[in-house]
Amino acid sequence: QLHLQESGPGLVKPSETLSLTCTVSGDSIVSYYQWAWIRQPPGKGLEWIGCIDYAGTTYYNPSLQSPVTISVDLSRNQFSLKMRSVTAAETAVYYCARHLGSVAGGVDYWGQGARVIVSS
Amino acid sequence: QSALTQPRSVSGSPGQSVTIPCTGTSSDVGAYNYVSWYQQHPGKAPKLIIYEVTNRPSGVPDRFSGSKSGDTASLTISGLQAEDEAEYSCCSYAGGYTHVLFGGGTKLTVL
């Protein structure tokens, strides 16, 4: 059974970099899937941030205000999110997840979510 | 590109059916058969219940069904049960620039 687990700081200061890592267990990250980051601000809907495949090909949401980088570490079966120059608008629960097949597919596995607060 | 449009809330009594619409545009919902639906209980991660407009993952009851007409996709839940009370969100592929759009979510209350 596939399991995804987010880890990283729960509090980030404004203008600094938000960094989260997703550890994948139960299957290799080297597979025909896209590995995604999705967030949910308090009381709001889900927002897709972007995704990456095992070869490092990335797709990002062009409407995001803060610059985003998603990377993959095959040796650790992990993928990561970095969001720079964050503001309070980045306060959210961040989920790592897996797309069914390509980026067009539904998201069939989700981590439990990591709550990140941006505040000084 | 704007998020997909869903009603903020819907309600129904046990045993009844409810339908939740998800309205997009000809660039997303109307263009691709890659609409998915998610059920989310408070404090929990979303759960995939419909993918590619009409398909149910293994283990999802057939009370949940999906459809699409033009730029609007719909989720229908028949035979409402108390445990169906949750937030439901739609999602669509939107092509090679925007990629993926979610709806704002609909709170289903089982009366």
Image (spheres, coloured by chain):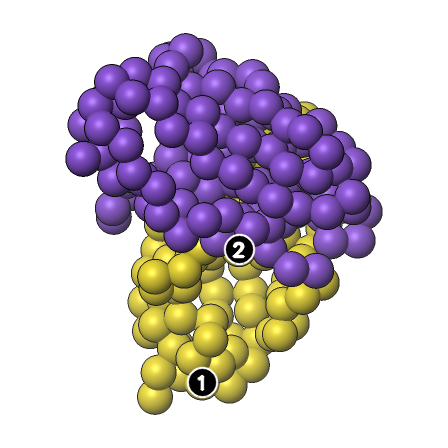
Chain colours: A yellow, B purple
Query: Where residue A14 is drawn, which disc sits there?
Result: 1
Question: What's the residue type where badge 1 is placed?
Answer: Pro
Distance from the alpha carbon under mark 2 to that under mark 1 = 20 Å
User: In the displayed structure, would residue A96 be above or below residue B84?
Assistant: below
User: In the displayed structure, would residue A15 be above or below residue B10?
Assistant: below
Residue indicated by mark 2: A47
Which of the 4 image quarters holds residue B34?
top right
Question: What's the residue type where badge 2 is placed?
Answer: Glu
Q: What residue do we see at 66% from left, 46% from top?
A: B24
User: Left of A63 or right of it: where is B9?
Assistant: left
Which percent across, then down, holds residue A103? 68, 38
Neighbour tally class for label 2: few under 14, some 14-19, many 20 plus, Cα within 10 Å: many
Which percent across, then down, holds residue B64? 42, 19
Q: Quadrant of the C terminus of chain B?
A: top left
Which of the 4 image quarters holds residue A111?
top left
Of the two numbered discs 2 and 1 on the same chain, state the one appearing first in sequence.
1
User: In the displayed structure, would residue A95 be above or below residue A117?
Assistant: above
Task: Output the chain of dot 1.
Answer: A
Residue A25 can be seen in this image: no
Q: Are marks 2 and 1 on the same chain?
A: yes
Q: What residue do we see at 25% from left, 39% from top?
A: B109
Q: Which of B94 and A108 is in front in this view?
A: B94
Q: Nearer the viewer, residue A68 or B84?
A: B84
Q: Quadrant of the N terminus of chain B?
A: bottom right
Q: What residue do we see at 60% from left, 55% from top?
A: B3
User: Left of A69 or right of it: where is B50?
Assistant: left
Q: Nearer the viewer, residue A26 or B88?
A: B88
User: In the displayed structure, would residue B92 be above or below residue B105?
Assistant: above
Task: Output the chain of dot 2.
Answer: A
